[in-house]
Amino acid sequence: MLRRYALGFSNAGRQFSTMSSNTPLEDAIRAKIRAAFDPQTLEIYNDSHLHAHHKAMQGSTSRETHFRLVIISDAFKSKLQPARHRMVYALLRDEMAQENGIHALQLRTLTPEEEARQKKKDVDTQKQQQQQSQQSETQKPVPASQG
C-alpha cells in the first residue's frame, strides 16, 4: 500500500493511505484548489468539531462541515477580496450543495506580495510592542522609602 506524508497543510505530518481517506471532502477541496489556483501556500483547517453542538448540525453524520482556508496564490493578483471569494465558492459549488457537504467556509485569500507585507507588518507590530513593554518597565516609579 502506498503511503505518503502531507506536509504544509492542516494535517501536517499525518500519514494517510492513498487507498481510502477519512477526509474525502477535505481531500477534494485540496485537489480542486491546487489544480485551479496553483497556490504557494494552502492551509486547510477542519473546524467541524467546534460546531458539532449547533442545532443546525444535530443529526448530521458528516465530520466535514466547517472549513477555514488560507490560500496564497498569484491567481488572486489584481482581484478584490469579494472576487477572490467568488472564485473559491464557484470552484467548491458542488461540495457546498451536496447533502452533508460544506456548511460553512471561512476564507483568507492573499497574493504572495500581500502575505509578505502582512508578515512584515506583524513583525513591526511585535517589535513596537516589545519596545513599549521595555519602556514601561524602565519608567515604573520607584517607591519612596519610608522614614
Image (tube, grey):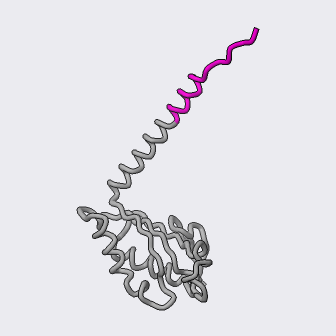
Quadrant in the rendering for residue 46: bottom right
Q: Residue furthest front?
A: 147
In the picture shown, does residue 48 fall above or below 108?
below
Image quadrant in which the N terminus is located: bottom right
Q: Residue furthest left?
A: 78
Q: Is residue 45 magenta?
A: no
In the picture shown, does residue 108 fall above or below 22?
above
Span of residues in magenta: 130-147
Quadrant in the rendering for residue 143: top right
Q: Position of residue 69 (x, y in %)?
A: 45, 69
Residue at the (49%, 41%) spot, across then down = 126
Q: Residue furthest bottom?
A: 99
Q: Nearer the viewer, residue 38 or 134?
A: 134
Q: Position of residue 75 (x, y in %)?
A: 29, 67
Q: Position of residue 131 (x, y in %)?
A: 50, 31
Residue 95 in view here: yes
Quadrant in the rendering for residue 97: bottom left
Residue at the (29%, 65%) spot, across then down = 76
Residue at the (51%, 88%) spot, across then down = 100
Q: Position of residue 84 (x, y in %)?
A: 31, 69
In the picture shown, does residue 43 fall above or below 112?
below
Q: Is residue 146 magenta?
A: yes
Q: Nearer the viewer, residue 42 or 97?
A: 97
* Left or right: residue 80 compared with residue 4: left
Residue at the (37%, 64%) spot, across then down = 109
Q: Total label count?
A: 0
